[in-house]
Amino acid sequence: MPSAPPPFPQGPFRFFALDVETANNERGSICQIGVAAVTLEGQIRTWVSYVNPETDRWTCSFVHGITDRMVQDAPKFATALAPLRRMLEGKVVWQHSSFDRTAIFAACERYGLERPEWDWQDSVRLARSTWPELKGNGGHGLASLKKYLGLQFRHHDAGEDARAAAEIVLRAELQARS
């Protein structure tokens, strides 16, 4: 029997960052969701859940290390999405590129679910305007920003990548104030 997703951190929160990992190249094959919830004081609390994508095609395991066996008893997408709908509805949700939004939308379409009404923002765009010196010099992807900003995270883990996106937003806000 599939397990329930972990409890979501308690707020209030100023904004969220979300990241997903997929089992294969089909965007709706979400196998992990991570959310970084940023408190009013700028602290980050992370929520992560494996998701059973109900697929036999695992062509992206080499990227993130998640396998069919690891998600066998994980909640299915609709169950994992339920607490996020409640917590993120109408809130600002950052993603590092549009991949995460399109994956959530593709999974909703795959399962016949309504798309969530979140205020999607893109931390790549924010990073481009905050650190234009990275254009042509590593770029604005998570790996480049990790090195440039001295961030500590394990790339291609949804919780870690969500936390990194939240940290990028916080650092960009600090830079804008100085």
Image (cartoon, grey):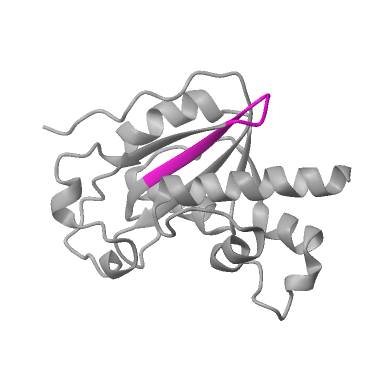
Quarter of the picture containing the N terminus is: top left
Q: Residue at x 66, y 53 (%)?
A: 123
Residue 104 seen in the figure: no
Residue at image position (28%, 44%) is 51
Q: Position of residue 70 (x, y in %)?
A: 18, 49
Q: Quadrant of residue 8?
A: top left
Q: Which quadrant would residue 34 be assigned to in this image? A: top left
**Is residue 173 found left or right of 63 in the rendered image?**
right
Residue sitting at the far front: 150
Q: How many marks?
A: 0
Rendering quarter of residue 126: bottom right
Q: Is 43 drawn above or below residue 51 in the view shown?
A: above
- x, y percent for residue 112: 37, 42
Q: Residue at x 39, y 35 (%)?
A: 81
Nearer the observer, 60 or 103:
60
Tell whether 77 sits left or right of 93: left
Q: Residue furthest right?
A: 178
Seen from the viewer's position, the closer of residues 20 and 48 is 48
The magenta region covers 33-43
Would you say residue 92 sits in the magenta stretch? no
The answer to whether residue 36 is magenta is yes
Q: Is residue 172 visible?
A: yes
Magenta-highlighted stretch: main secondary structure?
Answer: strand
Q: Is residue 76 left or right of residue 178?
A: left
Q: Please, is residue 130 above or below residue 162 in the view?
A: below
Vertical comparison of 131 with 54: above or below: below
Q: Position of residue 2 (x, y in %)?
A: 16, 34
Left or right placement of residue 68 versus residue 142 in this view: left
User: Looking at the picture, how far across and down is residue 22, in whole percent?
Assistant: 35, 58
Residue 57 versus residue 5: which sits nearer the camera?
Answer: 5
